Image (cartoon, rainbow, N blue to C red):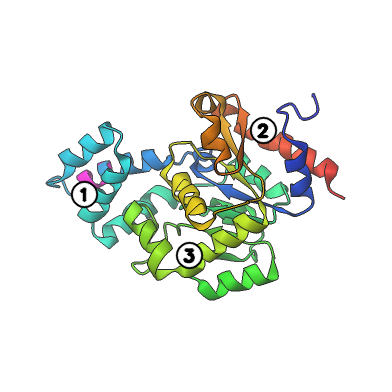
Amino acid sequence: MTPNPFNIPRFLIDTIAEGECVVFVGAGLSVQAGLPTWVGLIRDMLTWALNHNPGLSTASAIRTRINNGRFMEAAEALIGAMTPNEQRDFMIHTFAQAAPADAHRILAEIPFQAVITTNFDLLLEEVYPRRTPTLDYTQRGNIQRVLAEDAFHIFKAHGDYNGEAHNPPILTRSQYRNLLLNKHPAYSEYLRRVLSEKHVLFLGYSLQDPDLNFVLDTVQDIFDGHLPTHYALFPQSEIDELTGADNLSRNIRILSYPDHSQLVPWLRSLADEVAKSTP
């Protein structure tokens, strides 16, 4: 096989090998395990809500928003129409039976300094050692500790499907703004530290993913100056629609692979290249 067939940048390989890179994982990785994308999750949530409440009065308006691509508005309406218990039951129904895919197992071979994910499943926790520190946006003391220790950990940036009423999964823009601005200041401090002190690889996102745009908007809000070089991996079809200004304004260098079927080979190539470079 040709060495580095995807032309992964040497700088990225070296920063991972040196323990200076954090991976930021989106739903594209979980799709490998049969789970939905963020948009697919909203569609599935509406179907589930109608199955359990056929008289849902807002269903038609929510479906119209989905069909028109107004997914954030649809998510807000769905969360408003469902009780916390109904939301949790849907999340458990969707995520509880999933099992890690090859993409998760290969990711765990790569010596990232930490793993951040906006995914609601527990698949990353399953492929790392049981004692790996795992924390979410509510755990201010633990966030401060892992930042001080600079030790490997998994950070569930938007919670997970097991969240209770006091720490539900972050799914809507209003929930995210509340997380960022009001109740959990340690969250923005965590992102500020990671994005200003480490190199980050965004993996498994679409350019249209609200989860990714939430984070990138936060980057712009928090910083007004230099950031380390970060990387984001997208299918080539999406990159064709991206302008240089979109890319450079956030100091994120765009990497490509042909299509989603090549994500696992891309990860395999990265793991092999890092292994050759690790002292």
Residue 54, percent from left and from top: 15, 45
Name the residue type under label 2: Trp
Left or right? Give the position of 102 relative to 73. right
Between the C-alphas of marks 2 and 3, the distance is 30 Å
Q: Residue 52: give its label.
A: 1
Q: Residue 71: give its label.
A: none
Q: Residue 266: give its label.
A: 2
Foreground pick, 198 / 13: 198
Foreground pick, 154 / 141: 141
Within 10 Å of disc 1 (Cα), the crowding (few <14, some 14-19, many 20+) is few
Vertical side of 175 occupied by 106: above or below: above
Residue 266, percent from left and from top: 67, 33
Q: Residue at x 54, y 54 (%)?
A: 224
Res. 103 image quadrant: top right
Vertical side of 216 occupied by 243: above or below: above
Label 2 vs label 3, nearer the camera: 3
Vertical side of 87 occupied by 141: above or below: below
Between the C-alphas of marks 1 and 3, the distance is 30 Å
Q: Secondary structure at mark 1?
A: helix
Residue 230 seen anywhere in this rendered image of the structure: yes
List the residue tagged with mark 3.
137
Within 10 Å of disc 3 (Cα), the crowding (few <14, some 14-19, many 20+) is many
Name the residue type under label 1: His
